[in-house]
Image: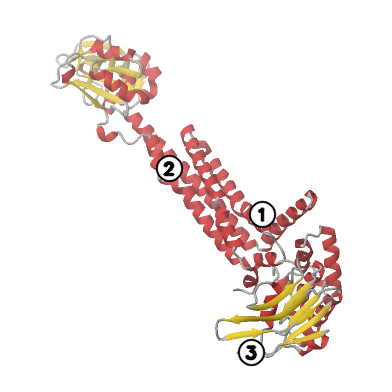
């Protein structure tokens, strides 16, 4: 057969596939709709579950997933300077603690009193990680509930007196109004004054980079004197540390989406071809070769399953686009690849059905 | 000879055997295979097509002869147009598009179904469908046409038209073997091959 004749035969088979599909609009619409829905659903499921995992992890991170609390087993004060020096350790984002506090009277408040905390420079950044620039540069920070009650804004002066006498003992100029901290909500009613790291502190708080969490934990164990009596614990407790996003991605349910979708489409495709046995048998009776059957089945599957599934997947990507991060985008892309590989096997079952057709029996309805 | 039957028999288990009279068939010709039900008319067509294998003797068919089938309810793509169905014959025989179209048009005109070319097959009557199947075989240039009760369940007018179509196919060079009970077909045939009921029981 010449090249031209071969191309003519191929074009004829493809035209036949298209013509047969056009003649059965119900079947075409059903297959396209189901395939498109499978593509959309598989990717949407994947994207939504991945986004949920990332958000849960972000929420945990914000709540202090990578924050250690270090304290002495019997409450002995730790060296504040040593705690502050942890800021020089690779992998530590910020470290600090409260070196002292005093309760002062503010007559304008219903409760009359507030707590003024003296903290090392690293503490505000551990308490307000979402506003490191502001919390790291302010010398006096006031919680937003307190400032709301007193009508204070950045630059305002707060005067307070000792509870034992009404003589003003201190004036604080507020540098930054701190929003409520997810990690330490109680600071919303306090004033934090940043002081040099001198003296002792009960608890040293250390925020680490996620990838350095374990390593920093090991360093901290030997960082303070009396290492045997030092307790290093996660801020959220052991229960707060769930699986890492990578582990959660590996075990998410939506990983099975491509396989479920492929199984559904394979069954639908096989059922469709079973119902078209007489049609296929006619082609074979009139001389269509095995290669011709393969061409027609592949072309049919490409038009009714592969293309619509990809369109559905693209649609899902468009829907997910605004919420995609590199992590969720990678997960979706991997699932898309998994779907593509699985779908490439879809025609196999149909081909088995089609090549097994006994033309004469099939056209006679047997 | 296009088809030669020599000492042919076929067993159906241990209790039933069919034996077929020796015969040579050469096209063009319309041959009616006549005989009572169960005498082996359809079986003989199966033997000629190569779908069945004889238990004894031989059915020799000229090599590379691919038969066209016309059945009581001929296989057609019912949602496609009449022309599309007829075109399948020459196209699947490897004829290029324009040549296939010319042959299809010629065959359909000869059998009086050209006016139906754009009609979907499901709108056509049984007789029209049978004529389309014959037109498809003609357009294909089939050397051997095997027809199994092609006029059964047709009204007399349709039966006559199908008969005429088979006759035309034979005129165009094909050997048409028709298994039938229809005397009208027998009258149109060039030869009658008679099978006696249950010869081997």
Residue A210's spot in the image, x, y percent? 36, 26
Q: Is residue A154 visible?
A: yes
Residue A143's spot in the image, x, y percent? 31, 23
Is mark 2 in CB contact (under 8 Å) with mark 3?
no
Location of residue A110 (image quadrant)? top left
Relative vertical location of residue A206 with respect to residue B122 in this rendering, above or below: above
Viewer-side label of 1, 2:
1
Viewer-side label of 2, 3:
3
Secondary structure beneath label 3: loop
Which badge, 1 or 2, comes first in the chain's sequence? 2
Residue A259's spot in the image, x, y percent? 48, 50
In the image: residue A55, left or right of residue B114:
left
| Chain assignment, label 2 | A
Residues beneath discs 1 and 3 located on the same chain: no
Q: What whole-number distance in Å separates the C-alpha atoms at marks 2 and 3?
A: 72 Å
| Chain assignment, label 1 | A
Secondary structure beneath label 1: helix
Q: What whole-number distance in Å separates the C-alpha atoms at marks 1 and 3?
A: 45 Å
| Chain assignment, label 3 | B
Disc number placed over residue A295 in the picture, else none: 1
Category of crowding for the residue at label 1, using alpha-carbon neighbours closer than 10 angstroms: few (below 14), some (14–19), many (at least 20): some
Q: Is residue B73 visible?
A: no
Category of crowding for the residue at label 2, using alpha-carbon neighbours closer than 10 angstroms: few (below 14), some (14–19), many (at least 20): many
Q: Which residue is mark 3?
A: B198
Location of residue A190 (image quadrant)? top left
Viewer-side label of 1, 3:
3
Q: Quadrant of the C terminus of chain A?
A: bottom right
Which is nearer the eye, A214 or A86? A214
Residues beneath discs 2 and 3 located on the same chain: no
Q: Could you tell me which residue is drawn at 65 percent across and 89 percent down? A: B199
Q: Which residue is mark 2?
A: A49
Residues beneath discs 1 and 2 located on the same chain: yes
């Amino acid at each position: 057969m010449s090249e031209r004749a071969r191309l003519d035969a191929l074009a004829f088979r493809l035209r036949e596939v298209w013509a047969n599909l056009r003649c059965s609009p119900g079947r075409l619409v059903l297959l396209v709709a189901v395939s498109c829905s499978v593509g959309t659903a598989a990717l949407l499921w994947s994207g939504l579950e991945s986004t949920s995992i990332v958000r849960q992890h972000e929420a945990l991170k914000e709540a202090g997933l990578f924050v250690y609390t270090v304290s002495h087993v019997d409450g002995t004060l730790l060296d504040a300077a040593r705690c502050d020096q942890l800021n020089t350790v690779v992998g530590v984002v910020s470290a600090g603690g409260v070196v002292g506090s005093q309760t002062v009277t503010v007559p304008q408040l219903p409760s009359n009193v507030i707590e003024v905390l003296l903290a090392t420079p690293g503490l505000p950044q551990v308490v307000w990680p979402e506003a490191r620039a502001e919390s790291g540069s302010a010398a006096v920070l006031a919680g937003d509930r307190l400032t709301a009650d007193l009508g204070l804004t950045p630059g305002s002066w707060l005067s307070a007196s000792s509870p034992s006498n009404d003589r003003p003992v201190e004036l604080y100029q507020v540098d930054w109004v701190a929003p409520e901290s997810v990690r330490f909500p109680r600071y919303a009613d306090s004033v934090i004054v940043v002081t040099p790291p001198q003296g002792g502190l009960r608890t040293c708080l250390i925020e680490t980079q996620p990838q350095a969490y374990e390593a920093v934990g090991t360093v901290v164990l030997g960082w303070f004197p009396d290492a045997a009596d030092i307790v290093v614990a996660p801020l959220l407790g052991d229960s707060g540390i769930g699986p890492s996003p990578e582990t959660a991605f590996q075990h998410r349910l939506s990983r099975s989406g491509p396989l479920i979708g492929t199984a559904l489409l394979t069954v639908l495709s096989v059922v469709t071809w079973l119902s078209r046995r007489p049609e296929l048998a006619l082609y074979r009776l009139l001389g269509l070769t095995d290669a011709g059957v393969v061409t027609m089945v592949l072309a049919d599957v490409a038009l009714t399953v592969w293309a619509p599934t990809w369109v559905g997947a693209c649609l899902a990507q468009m829907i997910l686009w605004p919420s995609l991060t590199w992590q969720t985008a990678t997960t979706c892309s991997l699932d898309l690849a998994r779907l593509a590989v699985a779908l490439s096997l879809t025609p196999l079952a149909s081909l088995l059905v089609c090549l097994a057709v006994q033309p004469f029996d099939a056209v006679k309805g047997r | 000879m296009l088809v030669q039957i020599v000492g042919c028999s076929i067993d159906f288990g241990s209790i039933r055997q069919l034996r077929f009279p020796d015969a040579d068939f050469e096209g063009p010709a319309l041959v009616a295979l006549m005989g009572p039900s169960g005498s082996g008319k359809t079986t003989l067509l199966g033997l000629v097509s190569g779908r069945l294998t004889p238990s004894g003797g031989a059915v020799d068919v000229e090599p590379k002869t691919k038969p066209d089938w016309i059945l009581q309810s001929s296989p057609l793509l019912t949602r496609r147009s009449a022309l599309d169905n007829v075109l399948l014959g020459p196209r699947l025989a490897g004829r290029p598009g324009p040549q296939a179209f010319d042959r299809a048009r010629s065959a359909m005109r000869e059998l009086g179904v050209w006016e139906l070319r754009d009609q979907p097959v499901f709108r056509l009557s049984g007789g029209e469908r049978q004529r389309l199947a014959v037109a498809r075989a003609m357009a294909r240039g089939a050397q051997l046409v095997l027809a199994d009760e092609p006029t059964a369940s047709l009204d007399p007018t349709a039966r006559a038209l199908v008969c005429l179509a088979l006759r035309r196919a034979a005129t165009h060079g094909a050997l048409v073997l028709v298994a039938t009970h229809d005397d009208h077909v027998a009258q149109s045939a060039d030869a009658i091959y008679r099978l006696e009921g249950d010869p081997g029981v």
